[in-house]
Amino acid sequence: MHPPVAASAVTVSLLLISVSLAQSGPVVAGGSGPDGSTVAEAATVPSQAAGVMWPENGGTLRVGGDLFAIVEHEGETYRSGAALIDTPLPVGYPAPTPAGAIELKAYPTVRRAQVAGEQNPDLGQNSSFWPLFEHIKKHDIAMTSPVEMDYDGLERDDASPRESDWTMSFLYRTPDMNSAGTEGRVVVADLPPVTMLAVGYTGSYSVGKVSVEVEKLYLWLDAHPEYRAIGPPRAMFYNGPDTPAARRWAEVQLPVERTAMPSALAAPNTSGTPATVAP
């Protein structure tokens, strides 16, 4: 059991970003706690002329889904509704995306220990977990959250990835821990910074559920051609098997890039010559 978190002691991350980008200027999200303290942060809504929305390193922009979902943050603990994460995230990682929200998130370099799958991921997660657990135990590396699952073989409309085309990873708290290399089935590697489109949810960690959630991201991209996916999906599983399935916090992500750079949209074009954008 965990004690309730007082609203006055938390930073509530609530970024209200207009999907239409029809206005610019500060938008204040939220209000005050019981003692008058501010419990929500202000977010800046860029205008269309300012360019395509893009998060800074370690930052998050709310771009769709549930614009009002709230994440409470105190120390290393995150809460959203009945969902709870009390295991530290890697340093510099953005806060978890709450259920129903769609966000753009900028991730820093991370070092991780990974094991490639050898069978259907719903059946093979357990056999991949234990080599990773023994690895961090051997090197005295504390467990972090989330466990990452990369689904390299999961294409749009696929019910399940090809059996060997997925990877489970444990994340190091900082990139300077241990060193890159291979130990049996475990490969320690550094992932470069990446920007992800993410949708949060609570529920099953099955590949079927992942497929349902990733389709929401593809539909968002269909409606926003200023972005495009540049790789396969991954999932972030924040809770262990001791958490009831209905309260397990997760998010599904796609790596994305801008198809139109801000410089091409920085000011209205009055020259009569069509503007060019990045391919």
Image: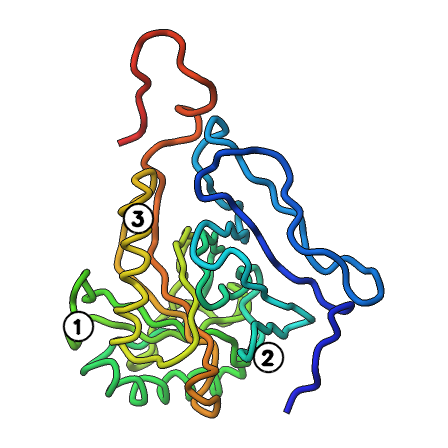
Q: Read off the residue under disc 2.
A: 86
Q: Secondary structure at mark 2?
A: loop
Disc tally is: 3
Q: Would residue 100 be found to the left or right of residue 115 on screen?
A: right
- Tell me the distance, in whole angstroms, between the alpha carbons under discs 2 and 1: 32 Å
Residue designated by label 3: 221
**Mark 3 belongs to which amino acid?**
Leu
Up-down relation of residue 213 to residue 206 (above or below): above
Contact (CB < 8 A) between labels 2 and 3? no
Where does the C terminus fall, quadrant-wise?
Answer: top left
User: Which residue is label 1 attached to?
Assistant: 159
Under circle 3, the secondary element is: helix
Whole-percent x and y of residue 23?
A: 54, 33
Where does the image place residue 183, in percent across and percent down from the top left?
34, 79
Q: Is residue 46 left or right of residue 34?
A: left
The amino acid at mark 2 is Asp
